[in-house]
Amino acid sequence: MAPWPNQPCPHPACAQPITDLLVEMVPDADRTGLEFKAILQQRPGGAITCPYCQGAVEYDRSGNALTASDRIPLRYSRVKMETRAADYGVQRIPPDLSMTPEQWIAEEKLMSGALQGYLYAEDLTP
Ligand SMILES: [Zn+2]
């Protein structure tokens, strides 16, 4: 099952429509953990950032709804996001070689305004 919640962000100050949690965009190193698995299987036990407010979101026990989470959320990889955006851009007619992750997520994922000032996994100090 694909983690496409298609529901508003559970953080009240945000409440933007999340069409896709984009779990495949977390760094490969984070894809082996139990937290990643929980999100993928749509159950509690792992959190990922909201693409808009970067707040931690987690599936509730029903597996159908997202809740605000106290966990440290998994974050998207800048490299993966930029690669995906670039791939999307070159396939456009005419090609758009300057496609940014912000443009890509707005256009393909219909999440306009997401990823503004996003802190990517690579941006965190180790
Ligand atoms: Zn949010």
Image: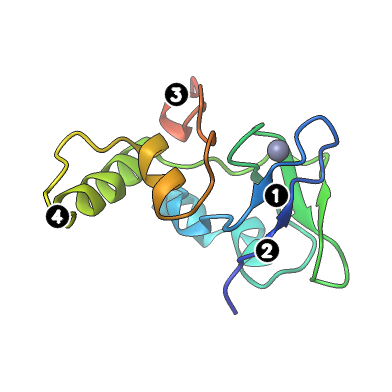
Residue 20 locus on image (x, y percent): 57, 58
109 is higher (above) or lower (below) than 113 = below
**Residues tagged 3 and 4 counted as in contact (Cβ below 8 A):** no
Q: Earlier in the sequence, mark 4 or mark 1?
A: 1
- Report the amino acid beneath label 2: Pro
Q: Earlier in the sequence, mark 3 or mark 4?
A: 4
Q: Quadrant of residue 123?
A: top left
Q: What residue is pinned by disc 2?
A: 5
Seen in the image, is 57 located left or right of residue 98?
Answer: right
Q: Nearer the viewer, residue 50 or 28?
A: 50
**Residues tagged 4 and 1 counted as in contact (Cβ below 8 A):** no
State the CA–CA distance, disc 4 to disc 1: 36 Å
Q: Quadrant of residue 12?
A: top right
Graded by Cα atoms within 10 Å as few (under 14), some (14 to 19) or many (20 or more), the crowding at tag 4 reads: few
What SS does tag 1 mark?
loop
Q: What residue is pinned by disc 1?
A: 47
Point 41% across, 30% down: residue: 122
Q: Nearer the viewer, residue 122 or 17?
A: 17
What SS does tag 3 mark?
helix
Q: Earlier in the sequence, mark 2 or mark 4?
A: 2
State the CA–CA distance, disc 3 to disc 4: 32 Å
State the CA–CA distance, disc 2 to disc 4: 30 Å
State the CA–CA distance, disc 1 to disc 3: 18 Å
Q: What residue is pinned by disc 3?
A: 123
Seen in the image, is 34 located left or right of residue 65?
Answer: left
Q: What residue is pinned by disc 4?
A: 93
